[in-house]
Amino acid sequence: MIFKDYYKILDLKNNNVTQEEIKQAYREQAKKYHPDINTENQFAEERFKDINEAYKVLSVPSAKRKYDRMWNSHVGKKQKNNYEESKREKGSIFSDFFKMFFGDTNTDIAENKPNNKNKKVAIKGENIETEIKVSIADAFYGVEKKIALRTLNGKMKNFTIKIPAGIRNGEKIRLMAQGKPGENGGKPGDLLIRIQIENDSKYKLEGFDLYTNLYLSPWEAALGTKVNVLSIDEQVALYVPQGVQSGEKIRINGKGYHDGKAGRGDLIAQVQIMVPKNMTTEEKSLFEQLQKISKYEPRKNT
């Protein structure tokens, strides 16, 4: 008698699974091997019966415990990887293997079984995924967006999506029952909309931190200064130390993006020292004087 690995039949790696995982695995395998889909594959009908048998046993906790005792004694032995059909009497939904260990009838399991072998199993429709782009500001404050998507029949359908404040980059919004239709009375799948937050000319988002450029004149960088930096929701006073270099980063705590825990990341100002292109005669004269008297050699230690 061939030992039937119900977990392998449902494409589960082991018996450490929840009832929800068993149910999900059953749905996937039932859809894959359903006779109505595999009309030219005689093997699919027998495989479909074994899939149903595996689910009927594993979905009943008492039957699963009894089966697991047998399963644990077999997993250490070498098993054939290829699928092998179970022998069953004509019209029976249970295989010889099942009857050997559970008897000809099992009340707990039999009550779950379909009496009509031609009864179609309800299969939930597949989910559909798409992606939309939003600005950092819209993602920070939250926004309601209207989008139009092409349905399976080629027609355009409008959706209103409420994007919550502080949504993460790559996070998905689920619209229930807007996916592909189910089969045999099954529920439709869902529409999953992935949010892609776009950087702009003012801000760049990395994790929970927002990056922005802080433009300084040469004299501001050399002498130090106080400037106002615009964060995403307010203006912040920032003290710039003297001698700051282009490319240095000044961190402003708690002025970044939502962190999902009622707090915020940081705003990081990246220093960019800007040299005037068009100078007045006086400005040019001052720079020439500085050039004559300064002993600073920026390339000396490079």
Image (cartoon, rainbow, N blue to C red):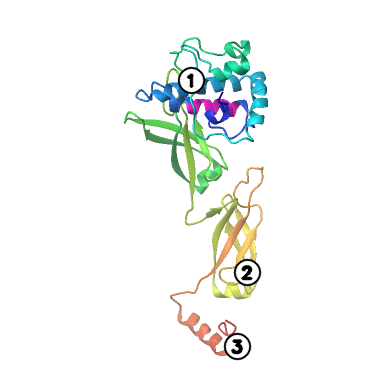
Pinpoint residue 199: horizontal percent, then vertical percent: 49, 53
Residue 20 sits in which quadrant?
top right
Q: Main secondary structure of the magenta part?
A: helix
Q: Which residue is mark 2?
A: 225
Q: Which residue is mark 3?
A: 295
Tell me which label, 2 or 1, sits earlier in the chain. Answer: 1
Circle 1: residue type: Lys
* Alpha carbons under labels 3 and 2: distance apart: 23 Å
Quarter of the image containing the C terminus? bottom right
Q: Secondary structure at mark 1?
A: helix
Circle 3: residue type: Lys
Label annotation for residue 39: none
* Alpha carbons under labels 3 and 1: distance apart: 89 Å
Residue 220 sits in which quadrant?
bottom right
Q: Residue furthest front?
A: 1
Where is 117 relative to 157, above or below?
above
Q: Does residue 24 show up magenta in the picture?
A: yes
Left-right relation of 237 to 275:
right
- The segment highlighted magenta reads 20-29
* Alpha carbons under labels 2 and 1: distance apart: 78 Å
Say whether marks 3 and 1 touch (CB < 8 Å). no
Q: Which residue is mark 1?
A: 49
Where is 51 relative to 168, above or below?
above
Q: Residue at x 46, y 82 (%)?
A: 281
Q: Does residue 297 show up magenta in the picture?
A: no
